[in-house]
Image (tube, rainbow, N blue to C red):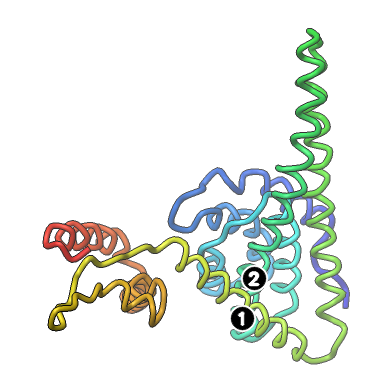
Amino acid sequence: MEKQLTKKDLNKLFWRLQSVRVTLNYETMQAPGFMRAIAPVLQKFYPDKEDLAEAMKRHNTFYNSHVVGNAIILGISAAMEEITTTPEDKEGVIALKTGLMGPLAGIGDSLLKFTWVPIIGSIGASLALNGSILGPILMFVLFNIVNMGGKYFGLVYGYEKGIDFFTKTEDNTIIQRISSMANVVGLMVVGSMIASSVKINTILEISAGENVIQLQEMLDTIMPNFLGLLVTIIVYNVLKKTSGKHSALIIISIMAISVLLKYLGVI
């Protein structure tokens, strides 16, 4: 199958990728920046305004990864947007993004942030301590050789290998399998985030004769972080029913309820 994106298109994606963190926020993290980066692809593949709006909404969901990992994911996402046709496969694009963002963030941080940056930082610092202006310049150059090079070649590699991989079969079974696997990984990522981020503990006690049972300890024996999961499910369903239109009101309501429960001695 002939690739529809040209080198010019990929270059446009690459330069847009540089500002992916400009619109970073605590609700969707890098999602607006990623959506802006992939917008030229969506505009090319969705000439109808309603289809384009739907595609942009899909990509404006929670997303956060390493800057170099973003390039690989952007390339693969562009390839999938080009190949996929059914609504289920379109959702698979988002599932794949969710499944890849965590692992690639870990790899990117360990290789670039915690390995390459300390190495070039020590080289630059040693030169700077000796009074050489080359210290910061050398660090800047060496960092961006890997940073910018990784982004560009990661984007191209993700797109080209994604196209080759997804067109190996005549049907969409391989995409469906990948979508299913990505959904599972994505759910695992979201589940771990809920367990680590949503902390709700109750201080209520239940008297049973001479014994006093700590409700939180009892809940933890059944399922740790049960209350956090329960609240997350409730908030998710409210957001789903309201199509996310009243997210600010929901946040304020959660804050008010939290203060009230704390005042009443429930949490």
Q: Residues within 10 Å of mark 1 (few under 14, many from 20)?
A: some
Left or right: 167 as drawn, with respect to 215: right
Instruction: Say if 31 sits above or below 187 in the image.
Output: above
| Res 231 quadrant in image | bottom left
Residue at 67% x, 44% y: name it.
18
Tell me the kind of residue under disc 2: Gly
| Res 80 quadrant in image | bottom right
Q: Secondary structure at mark 2?
A: helix
Q: Residues within 10 Å of mark 2 (few under 14, many from 20)?
A: many
Residue at 75% x, 59% y: name it.
72
Disc on the earlier residue, 2 or 1: 2
Front residue of 226 and 19: 226
Left or right: 238 as drawn, with respect to 98: left
Instruction: Say if 127 sits above or below 263 in the image.
Output: above
Residue at 78% x, 57% y: name it.
155
Tell me the kind of residue under disc 1: Val
Q: Mark 1 — residue?
A: 184
Q: Mark 2 — residue?
A: 99
- Rendering coords of residue 256 (x, y %): 18, 58
Left or right: 81 as drawn, with respect to 161: left
Residue at 68% x, 67% y: name it.
100
Front residue of 90 and 122: 122
